[in-house]
Image (spheres, grey):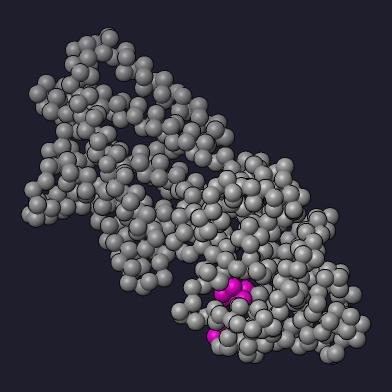
Amino acid sequence: MSDQETTKIEIGDGAAIPSPEDRGLVSAWWIALLGTVSLLIILPLVKPDPYLRILKFVPDGILVTFKVTVFSILLAIVIGLLTGLGRISKNRLINMAASLYVEVVRGIPLLVQLFYIYFALGRIVRVPDIVAAIVAMAFCYGAYMGEVFRAGIKSIDFGQTEASLSLGFNQRQTMAYVILPQAWRTILPPVGNEFIALLKDTSLVSILAVSDILRRGREFAAESFNYFETYTMIALIYLLITLVLSKLISIMEHRLSHYERR
Amino acid sequence: MNAVDPIIKIEHVNKYFGTFKALDDVSLNVNTGEKVVVLGPSGSGKSTLLRSINRLETINSGTISINGRDINSPTEDINRVRMELGMVFQSFNLFRHKTVLENLTLAPIKLKKMPKKEAEKLGMSLLEKVDIPERANHYPIQLSGGQQQRVAIARALAMEPKIMLFDEPTSALDPEMINEVLDVMIALAREGMTMVVVTHEMGFAREVADHVVFMDQGAVVEKSTPEVFFNQPQHQRSKMFLEQIL
């Protein structure tokens, strides 16, 4: 009784985050990591031209990719929390606004949204390209994040809310002290997935004159005509980053679940 | 206000779930220090009545007053009223992300602005009272059902309520754990706490109740002392109910 199952939110997007119980995925993770690292070391050693030159040229872009990813996800989490709360709100106007936002964003391809927000924003204010890119990514991912937050909040047993209200907490305090701290655990894995998916999707901002990993690679390839070698290195760099991130998220998730263990 | 006024005053309350009439013109008074046990078959509205007292259910008509304050009045701050009403649920509902002690201290710290040290001292003394101090730093999931329910009682007491509401507190427990919870409730009754208890524990009703309220189909059928209710029930439906369960 009352030992409600911990709900897992499945979102079939982004890299798989290995759980320690999933043996197949864990060993696949190790093989992929070892393969990626060895290739990133061996290729430049064996054939410095062009691999070493690529490796020296691209890292500026890694920083930009990270910048776009981190700022976008933070903004998307804020938008997502507000959207998730809006979607469960009893206020019909707020609920409608949040639902409309989710529907619109989910119905338009990310690439189209990027162009749209980039040029729409450009008409109103002059902001650096990277800011426009971050706003556009956050606007899109905020809608998906909103659904994650909504599902996470709804996964918490209503008895928790009733217990909190009966002690004298109001709705807002109940959300802040009782529901969100518990929902966070359910929310973290899909947020981690979204983070990794977003990191990969930031490659789209290379079309907006933002010098991320892919953009730097394209610049290098266009000059040197080493297309195959360049995209090999780019793919390996993305893979290394997402592999490490998925592991970090898996560790964090494990840490957060301490109160679920007997 | 007058000291003999009932602390809980329920007058002509009606409540519908859709077209189903859950409460049918219910009136009931509970005086300070009184213990009222509500009995009745499932679906008789006894839990709904209890949950209406702290407005976890809203009523459609009638009035419910706590200490002379109409809890459904728009000008009344329901959260203030709820601080004076402790509630214990069938499924315990301990905060799963907090330790046992944190479950007890959360509301006093946040709502009464009690210093953390003082709240912890109060919390520990309440855990002594429900006989589970050694589990203070465990998480709810590490406790048995009986232990969780005793902690839930202590959590409600930490707000120093004037009234305690119990909604089938032993119904989710394994039989061997029922008594440890009932013992805590009996001790609380002896201290003079005002209590409204929805339960199927007839032994508890006999021993503790000042009045037994029997409900059926959303209405209060009979309100008697336990002696009268269990020995000479005044109503045909009470008689049938007792025959079925005894």
User: Would you say residue B96 sits in the magenta stretch?
Assistant: no
Q: Residue at x 27, y 57 (%)?
A: A105
Q: Residue at x 72, y 45 (%)?
A: B133
Q: Is residue B226 left or right of residue B40?
A: right
Residue A180 in view, yes or no: yes
Q: Is residue A95 left or right of residue A139?
A: right
Position in image of residue B37 (x %, y %): 77, 75
Position in image of residue A173 (x %, y %): 47, 59
**On screen, residue A224 above or below A151:** above
Position in image of residue B128 (x %, y %): 74, 49
Residue A155 in view, yes or no: no
Q: Is residue B160 left or right of residue A186?
A: right
Q: Nearer the viewer, residue B43 or B66?
A: B66
Q: Residue at x 53, y 49 (%)?
A: B115
Q: Nearer the viewer, residue A251 or B8?
A: B8
Q: Nearer the viewer, residue B26 or A190?
A: B26
User: Would you say residue B53 sits in the magenta stretch?
Assistant: yes
**On screen, residue B223 above or below B155:** below
Residue A205, by quadrant, is top left
Q: Is residue A230 left or right of residue B183?
A: left
Q: Residue at x 14, y 24 (%)?
A: A220
- Direction front: furthest residue: B2
Q: Which quarter of the figure is the N terminus of chain A placed in?
A: bottom right
What residue span does the magenta drawing correspond to?
B51-60
- Direction right: furthest residue: B231
Position in image of residue A244 (x %, y %): 39, 28
**On screen, residue B214 above or below B161:** below
